Amino acid sequence: MFIDRKVELANLEARYRSERAELFVLYGRRRVGKTELLRHFCVDKPHVFFIATLSSDLDQLASFSQRIWRFTHDETPEGFTFPSWEAAFAALADLPGRPIVVLDEFTYLFSGNRAIPSLLQKAWDERLRHTRVFLILCGSYIGMMEREVLAYQAPLYGRRTGSYLLPALELPAAAAFFSSYGAVQQIETWAVLGGMPYYLGIFADETDVFSNIRTHILDSQGILRREPQLLLMEELREPRNYFSILRAIAEGATRLNEIAQAARVGDAGTTGRYLDILQGLRVVARQVPATEGRPEKSKRGIYQISDAFLRFWFRYVHPNQGSLDLGLADAVLVQRVQPTFDQFVSYAFEEAARAHVARLARAGKLPFLAERIGSWWDRSGEIDVVAVSNADGALLLGECKWSVNPVGIDVLDDLQRKARLVDPEGRWPAVSYALFAKSGFTSALTERAAIENVHLVGPDDLATDDLEELT
């Protein structure tokens, strides 16, 4: 199932129509759908699609050579290979028409031959940049792609004509995988799996969310049971320490000193270096209040696991490995997952609300030009959704309630009270409000919201791309 990616496909199509030489770098987390995106893009276009493996350098060269040969020949001579990578890259310049050449899992390719980026740079400078070739380098190891391909010291620096870090799908696209679910179940599933297409394709909406969790994550034979272990062990040299840090964050430690004490992998300095690496892998994110003028200097930063599935796995699977290995998946589901599941989903609900506001901003449906979207907190309280425009002197403040009861006037009153805590000096005179609720709103709140132009958002609004303008 190929869903969404309209913006990414439109970008690739526009570059393809340019007719000039392109060296495009596409990278992102494993399972995020890079290969499927490129396959979809290549349909009905002349292309060479090569997926590197962990085989020897000579085997890789032979396989790549045969792919190039088959672009213009019906049959490939047995054992055919170019004599060198230089010759293979040079041969790309002779491909007719507007060829797309995809080098997928590019990090595997140069892990087996460290000279490949330099050889490709030489071929690009001498011949390829003067052709119509559309060369795409694709890789899953984010840190390695940024160091070895995109960084200033990398041989290919300055040659790329474009690059894109492919993100996970947002909630409306992820919800499309589960057309039989209602919006609440779609949000619950997104809270567990996030926007990774591979994970979303494993769950089935013929059964409920807990049944899918039991079958595919908690069961010893579940296809996602050991997925984070495989993912992180490929990326990290000392996975045990990183696992301890991620578990500490999943269990509620968010500040550096708290994480260091809970994870027990070293002092704050050592823990901070581990966190820097996890941030580079886009597994952990450092967040600061959206109203901070210089977020990189803020001392109010907290750390969160940015990947939804890793957040679920470290919250419920990792600490219960012993019970799960004993075959007690049903007991873990009933005694560990279900009692706290709504609390777990509420965090994702807040993320979905912030993403909804970001989509409103991109669609030009906010009453101001947003500069930052996030949340806010200090010792006096917290606000789930905050959008800031210093230039327009405007704030949007939002509260999220993932509960069985409809939201009433008291929630709006409390949010308006907290607005004075956020802006005691009147830096943002134009303040608007939004409320996000799992179970809807009372009639009294609905009437008042209409008078005061408060934006009311339910699960159906979050799980679709139908955006109502916020005035």
Image (cartoon, grey):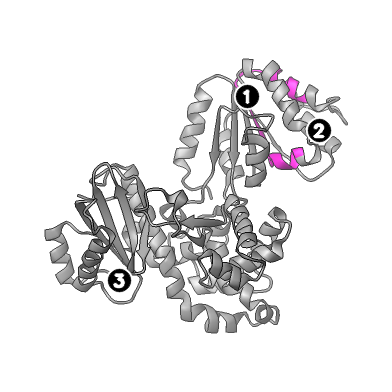
- The disc labelled 3 sits on which kind of residue? Ser
- The disc labelled 2 sits on which kind of residue? Leu
Q: Residue 59, position in %: x, y? A: 84, 37
Considering only vertical position in the picture, is 236 above or below 378? above
Q: Residue 222, position in %: x, y? A: 65, 69
Residue range corresponding to the magenta coloring? 88-110
Q: Earlier in the sequence, mark 1 or mark 2?
A: 2
Left or right: residue 203 versus residue 117 is left
Report the residue marked by disc 2: 61
The residue shown at (23%, 51%) is 428
Nearer to us of marks 1 and 3 is: 3
Q: Is residue 101 magenta?
A: yes
Instruction: Report if residue 223 is visible in the image.
Output: no
Marks 1 and 2 sit apart, C-alpha to C-alpha, by: 19 Å
Left or right: residue 78 versus residue 47 is right
Report the residue marked by disc 1: 99
Badge 1 element: loop
For the residues labelled 1 and 3, say whether their Cβ atoms are less than 8 Å apart.
no
For the residues labelled 1 and 2, say whether their Cβ atoms are less than 8 Å apart.
no
- The disc labelled 1 sits on which kind of residue? Pro
Hey, which residue is sitting farthest left in the picture? Answer: 451
In the image, which disc is placed on residue 439? 3
Badge 3 element: loop
